Image (spheres, rainbow, N blue to C red):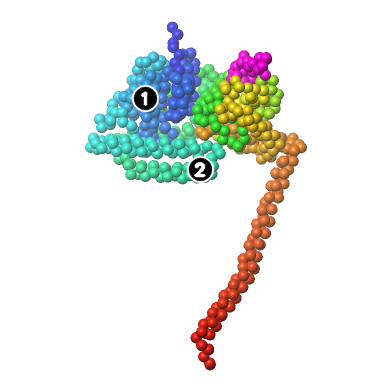
């Protein structure tokens, strides 16, 4: 009998563990991982877009620091409670490397359906997943069942830097810590929001300064709360447990586990033994028959795509100073178009992996791959057989739009920067070069750069899809009613928009592009929480600089001349200005001062003489 398909959402901030668990689950035909999340926000966004039938939640969520405290399971417990409130129909299976009894009890009371330790055998874990997915409960035999009598089941665990021991001699301690936890949660939420705003590209300097000040104030407030409402010291037994745990963590750090986690993951994933071992030290042996780096690159692709999908939920307003073709679309049509491109890109990557294309071969196929991506997106977005009746003619929209393929390729697609680097990263895990330094595929710098390149590719292909539409069907009523923003539906606004685009490409061709080449930069379109922004990245472009000619070369010469003359000119102006100031203050000023002094002395003498004249003659000597 065929097992029903189980759609899984993995919530764990341990990337190595998530990678191995997903790889192990993919060997079972009834298991499908629909998403991975590291944070509460990412999990909620994935659930809103792709409903799951089972959530596997790490109760130790948030343990990204070098100490192990009850705070580690407070984050996971709170997320478990939130998920059961918003999605009570989705069962939750908990995992933990070192569970606290009160955390397990609170999660069970919140509605969690199962628990397994991270040291559980693979067969038992698979049984637990299938059993919980069918609506039953599964609580591992080694799950902690005893709770200290003084601990309130279901109460939120404290956020502290040391374990909290609740004693029966302090009945108000639980309320005290609850208030403390509530305040810290609000401060942490505000800090996270401000940090996200500070990371946005193109943020004005004044706004950045204000946000930085608020961030410092919140950090100070958090420190004050921790000092004033610090939890009491733990008893001797708790201290012994804590010291044991910290000694284990110290051994992990001394052995360089954090630095070599990814290398160990790659080595373990390439193993050929079909088994799974999960241990308490976040060590993972995931051994499925994986022999190629292409399959090992899939988790990176999933992570990038998930992050991009989450950003597509934000507004898509154009925050740059230049118009974009997709500005004419309604918000929902923009989002739909970008979703289609992302899906088509995923299909393209799967086809390239299936064809076993090598990096050297892909270099030749790159223009055709991006062109095919544009063609597939155009066909899917408008519909292969979408037909417009203009007068006595019936025109197939897609066929007409594809006639502009040479123009679209030369103006947009072929100018998309570093597209080969992005595909090589997604397909073969080739390191990305950031500021002339190569970073391995799993490093934060490479992931951030790949995310920027991916978003720029999506937006450029989206512009390429709309450009032929503006050339052929810009003022067709059916098109305007179906796709256009209501502010750009009049003929005058449409023509103004098209003229703005024409001038943009002219300025970009003759001024913007040579300037970027001369400055060794690429301009990328990226997504942030406010909309579509523009950012610059460094990349050597010496070969393109040598190929410039005509007006483009003249622009670079003007820039070079300005760079050569401007500092000296400013120095000369500053020197003349200081000389002028010297003349005004030291020469004219002193002269005017002497004149003024003489005038004042004359006035004083006249006043004295007048006074003497009134009082009589000066007495004789």
| Residue 579 sits in quarter | bottom right
Quarter placement of the N terminus: top left
- Residue 391 inside the magenta-drawn segment: yes
Residue located 63% across and 62% down the image: 581
Q: Is residue 168 visible?
A: yes
- Which of marks 1 and 2 precedes in the sequence? 1
Question: Of residues 80 and 549, which is closer to you in this image?
Answer: 549
- The reply, left or right, for residue 429 in relation to residue 219 is right
Res. 207 mark: 2
Residue located 44% across and 19% down the image: 52
Measured as percent of width and height from the top left, residue 278 is found at 43, 23
- Residue 377 inside the magenta-drawn segment: yes
Q: Secondary structure at mark 2?
A: helix
Q: Residues within 10 Å of mark 1 (few under 14, many from 20)?
A: few
| Residue 525 sits in quarter | top right
Q: Which residue is farthest front?
A: 614
Measured as percent of width and height from the top left, residue 349 is found at 59, 21
- The reply, left or right, for residue 388 in relation to residue 9 is right
Query: Which residue in the protein does label 1 denote?
Result: 85
- Gap between marks 2 and 1, in whole Å? 36 Å
The magenta span reads: 374-400
| Residue 463 sits in quarter | top right
Q: Residues within 10 Å of mark 2 (few under 14, many from 20)?
A: few
Q: Which residue is farthest left?
A: 169
Measured as percent of width and height from the top left, residue 405 is found at 69, 22
């Amino acid at each position: 009998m065929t097992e029903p398909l189980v759609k899984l959402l993995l919530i764990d901030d341990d990337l190595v563990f998530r990678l191995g668990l997903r790889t192990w689950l993919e060997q079972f035909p009834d298991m499908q991982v629909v998403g991975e999340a590291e944070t509460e926000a990412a999990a909620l966004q994935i659930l809103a877009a792709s409903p799951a039938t089972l959530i596997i939640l790490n109760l130790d969520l948030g343990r990204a620091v070098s100490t192990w405290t009850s705070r580690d399971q407070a984050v996971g417990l709170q997320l478990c409670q939130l998920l059961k409130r918003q999605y009570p129909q989705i069962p939750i299976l908990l995992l933990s490397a070192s569970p606290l009894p009160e955390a397990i009890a609170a999660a069970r009371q919140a509605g969690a359906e199962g628990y397994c330790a991270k040291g559980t055998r693979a067969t038992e874990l698979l049984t637990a997943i299938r059993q919980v997915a069918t609506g039953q409960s599964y609580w591992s035999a080694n799950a902690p069942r005893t709770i200290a009598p003084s601990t309130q089941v279901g109460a939120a665990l404290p956020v502290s830097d040391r374990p909290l021991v609740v004693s029966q001699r302090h009945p108000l301690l639980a309320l005290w810590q609850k208030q403390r936890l509530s305040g810290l949660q609000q401060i942490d939420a505000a800090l996270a929001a401000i940090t996200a705003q500070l990371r946005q590209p193109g943020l004005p300097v004044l706004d950045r300064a204000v946000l930085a000040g608020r961030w410092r104030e919140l950090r100070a407030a958090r420190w004050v709360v921790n000092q004033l409402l610090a939890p009491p010291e733990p008893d001797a037994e708790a201290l012994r447990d804590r010291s044991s745990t910290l000694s284990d963590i110290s051994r992990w750090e001394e052995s360089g586990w954090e630095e070599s986690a990814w290398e160990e993951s790659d080595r373990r994933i390439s193993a050929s033994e079909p088994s799974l071992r999960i241990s308490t030290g976040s060590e993972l042996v995931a051994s499925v028959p994986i022999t190629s780096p292409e399959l090992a690159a899939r988790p990176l692709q999933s992570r990038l795509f998930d992050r991009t999908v989450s950003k597509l939920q934000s507004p898509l307003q154009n925050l740059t100073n230049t118009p974009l073709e997709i500005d004419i679309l309604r918000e929902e049509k923009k989002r739909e178009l970008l979703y289609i491109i992302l899906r088509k890109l995923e299909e393209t990557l799967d086809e390239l992996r299936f064809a076993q294309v090598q990096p050297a071969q892909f270099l030749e196929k790159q223009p055709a791959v991006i062109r095919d991506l544009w063609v597939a997106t155009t066909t899917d977005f408008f519909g292969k057989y979408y037909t417009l009746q203009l007068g006595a003619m019936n025109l197939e929209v897609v066929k007409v739009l594809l006639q502009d393929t040479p123009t679209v390729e030369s103006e947009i697609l072929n100018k998309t920067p570093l597209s080969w680097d992005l595909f090589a990263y997604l397909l073969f895990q080739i390191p990305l070069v950031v500021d002339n330094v190569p970073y391995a595929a799993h490093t934060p710098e490479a992931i951030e750069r790949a995310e920027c390149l991916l978003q720029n590719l999506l937006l450029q292909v989206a512009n390429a899809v709309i450009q032929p539409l503006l050339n052929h069907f810009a003022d067709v009523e059916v098109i305007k009613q179906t796709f256009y923003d209501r502010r750009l539906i009049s003929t005058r606004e449409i023509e103004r928009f098209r003229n703005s685009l024409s001038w943009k490409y002219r300025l970009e061709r003759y001024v913007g592009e040579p300037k970027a080449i001369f400055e060794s930069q690429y301009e990328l379109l990226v997504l942030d929480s406010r909309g579509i922004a523009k950012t610059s990245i460094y990349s050597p472009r010496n070969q393109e600089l040598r190929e410039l000619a005509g007006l483009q070369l003249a622009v670079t010469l003007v820039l070079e001349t300005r760079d050569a003359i401007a500092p000296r000119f400013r120095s000369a102006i500053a020197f003349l200005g200081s000389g002028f100031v010297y003349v005004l203050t030291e020469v004219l000023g002193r002269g005017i001062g002497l004149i003024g002094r003489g005038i004042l002395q004359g006035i004083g003498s006249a006043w004295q003489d007048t006074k003497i004249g009134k009082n009589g003659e000066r007495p004789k000597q």
